[in-house]
Every structure is written in structure tokens, then in C-alpha cells.
Image: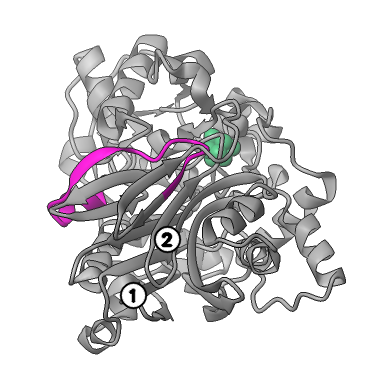
Amino acid sequence: MLDKFKDECGVFGIFGHPEAANLTYLGLYALQHRGQESAGIATADGEKVRVSRAMGHVAEAFDERALESLPGHIAIGHTRYSTAGESRLQNAQPILIDCAHGQIAIAHNGNLVNARELRDRLVRDGSIFQTSSDTEVVLHLYARSREHTVEDALIESISQISGAFSFALMTKDRLIAARDPHGFRPLALGRLGDAYIVCSETCALDLIGATYLRDVEPGELLIIGDGGLRSLHAFPRGPLAHCIFEHVYFARPDSYVFGKSVNEVRTELGRILARESPAEADVICPIPDSGVCGATGYSDASGIPMEMGLIRNHYVGRTFIQPQQAIRHFSVKIKLNPVRSVLEGKRVVLIDDSIVRGTTSRKIVTMVRAAGAKEVHMRIACPPTISPCFYGVDTPNKSELIAATHSTEEIREFIEADSLAYLSLEGLLQSVAPESGSYCTSCYTGKYPVAIPRDERAYLQLALKAVE
Ligand code: SF4
């Protein structure tokens, strides 16, 4: 398995289209990179909410019959990588409940940092949980609310949670979107004819031919029904903390997130890296696919030509069924193959977007040398990753992050490169200027914008361990 942080989740919602389920299926297809463990779609026809969920990729999870069993003009969908809660069907989303306020389904991208605390309290008060997912906490809070309207019950329940959330929710006759006051995870609003759409990334709008209108704002609750769209600034806006890793790695380069083109930011990271850490070399090679934009920028700023010195096999199955270390090494070889004609006799700069444990980088450097490279220089288009994420991204324990315990020189020795340099934190922030102050950079600094309760850290790390 390539040594990367794991993607989180993708959410999609649509109101006012006769083919809501089919379009949600396509939207999830575009968001597949954000989660590959399970997929689900819920639809409503004004009378009833129905849901279908399955393990696996969107294409495996749904066939024509499954989509036909989901009638209605409203739908939400979810692709999941489990960041909190084990990987099993019960934890797949959307989660649908029926309570005093009627049916409600929820799809969540992010991670709640006070879920355990709330869950313990709810269990003490008699709640019975069906899943180990943090998202279910919101539904319990909602079901217990004594407010009289769906809207007020939602505001009351969401006001109690803390952390990262971009929600797509639906009742039998409404689509609702909510984003946490810090705006950790992206959530875009679009339009297709008379239909409204919310989705994690704009690439999902592109696929179905919809137009991007704007982002759902941090702290905003959007309610879309037969009367149109209503926006409530229901939750006091906190200091903004957009996840910078969306730009570095997670989001697709053809998306716009936090109002910026991912491709442009990622390419700029490469340009800044080239200025900060130049290398005497003959060729720039990206580690595909994540290093491609950074390598384009590095090549652009350095004037050194870029070539594909490593080719990725896109048809390799999901490798989490190969958990042993010995096989993991094999999976690097099966995913990437060096191109001898590009590398032989050359001084090569390899560009990647991150080093997590360092084991994959070491394999790649060895592979490139074995293919005849004279020198191998590694350049990383982000700062050293030194701290885990608690806001919806699956990261290893701090002790497993090589940069948390090793200096850059020690990492260079470990991966056996001739030189190694990372982008500086200032360089990273420069790429998103002038909004640099609106970003979360905790995994590079260890400073967390939303406090994480002490036992919550242990709980979250335990939950992540369970799915490794
Ligand atoms: S800690 Fe890192 S991955 Fe997590 S939200 Fe902050 S920037 Fe993103």
C-alpha cells in the first residue's frame, strides 16, 4: 500500500430532480477517491425515505436494480473511508432513523472530537447505539430534542457537537446541508436546472453537468425544500481552519475547494519548492499520481524537464487485504514501475506530496536506482508530517510518523536518497495566500485549532487502529 494518509469521506446531496438516485450515483463516482470502503444512497419522494448501502466501491455497491429501488426527487449519498468506527456495513452511511421528528438520513464528512463524551452521556441516559460511528451521536441528539420543528431540533443537536463536519441530511421532503463553524472540510453548492446539489468537491458537479454556485459557508445551515433554498447562519462562526491537506493531497486536482483550484495550488507548491530547495539534476519525475502537479510546478520553476519516470498501474485491487509487511513491499512494486529509458544515467529529482512512514519512499528510491539513475534527489511538496489528524483524516499514530521522530537528514539516510528537502510551512501557506490564516496545518505543527479532549485522543487513535 502506498504510504499516504487515508482519504476521508465524500458526501453528495440533490433536491428537485426526477433522477435523484442516478445523479447521486454519478456524483459518488466522482467522489470515489474520498472513500472506498462503503457507499450508500438514500432517497425520498415526499412521503418516505429509503436507503441502500453496501461495502466496496460505488460501482460494486449499486446496480440498476438497486438504483430503481430508490425512487424520489431528493437524495443524499456517501462514500466512506472509516476514520472513526470500524469498517463494517453497519457503519456505512447514510444512516437513516425514524424518530419523533420523522425520518432523517445523514451523510457526514469529518470527525467529531467530542463524540465519545456525548455518546457516554447518551448511553447513561438510555440511548442504544447501532453503530460505532461518531455520526450516530448527532442523530441521537436530534431524536431527543424537544424542539418542535426539524430545523430547531437540528440546530439544537448540531450546536452540541464539536470538530469537523460537512453534513448532507435529508427528511422526506427536504435536503439539508450543514458545515462546521471552522470549515474544516469542503462542501460546495451547485445547480442543475431547477435542482440544487451539495457535494464535497466540485468535480462531482462537473460530471453531472451542474454549475457551481458557491461553497456552503462555515457555520451555515442550508435548507432546501419545495419553497426553495433558505440559508441560516445557525452556528457562530469560529476561527477558520480549512484542511490544507485537501489541497496537498486529498481533493482531485480538477476540483475547486475553499474557493481555489486544487491544481493551481498544488502546482504552485511545486514552484515554491523548486525555489526553496533547488537540485542539480537532469530530469524531474513525479511519483504518480499525487506528485504530478507538484512536479509540473517544480519543472516549471527550475527549467528542468519533467518526464514520467515511474508508471502507475491503475488496475491494482485494493491492497488492504494484504496487511503483512512482506506483502506490503510487494504492493509498491505492483503499483509503480520505473521507466529505464527515462532514468538511466540521469540525476533524477523525485517529487512526492508527503512522506508518512518512509517505507514506500525508500522502496521507490531503491527501484529508481536499480533502473539506472545516477543520483536520486527527493523533494516533498509539503512540510514534514509530525502530528496526527483528529478532524476526519486517518493518520497513523505519532510514533509511526517518521518526521515526528527523525530529522530530515535521518529520513534521507533511511530512504537512501542523495538529498531530501521538504517544503517549508511558510511556503505551504504562501500557496494559499492571501487566505493563509484560514487554514488548519495541525499535522505539520502539532497545534490544534479545536481542542481535543484528552481521552478523545486515545479513543480516536484506537478507532483508527481498529481499521488498520
Ligand atoms: S490536521 Fe492536517 S489533515 Fe487534519 S484537518 Fe488539519 S491540515 Fe487537514
| Residue displayed at 24% across by 89% down | 65
Q: Which residues are magenta?
A: 203-222
Q: Is residue 273 left or right of residue 165?
A: left
Q: Is residue 38 above or below residue 223?
A: below
Q: Secondary structure at mark 2?
A: loop
Q: Position of residue 434 (x, y in %)?
A: 40, 13
* Ligand 1 occupies quarter: top right
Which colour style is shown?
Answer: one colour
Q: Is residue 386 left or right of residue 41?
A: right
Q: Secondary structure at mark 1?
A: loop
The mark nearer the N terminus, 2 or 1, is: 2
Label 2 to label 1, Cα distance in Å? 29 Å
Q: Is residue 75 left or right of residue 141?
A: left
| Residue displayed at 25% across by 13% down | 302
| Quarter holding residue 346 | top left
Q: Is residue 314 above or below residue 434?
A: below
Three-letter amino acid code of the residue under disc 2: Gly
The residue carrying mark 2 is 35
Q: Position of residue 373 (x, y in %)?
A: 30, 34
State the mark number for residue 46. Answer: 1
Confirm whether the magenta stretch covers residue 206: yes
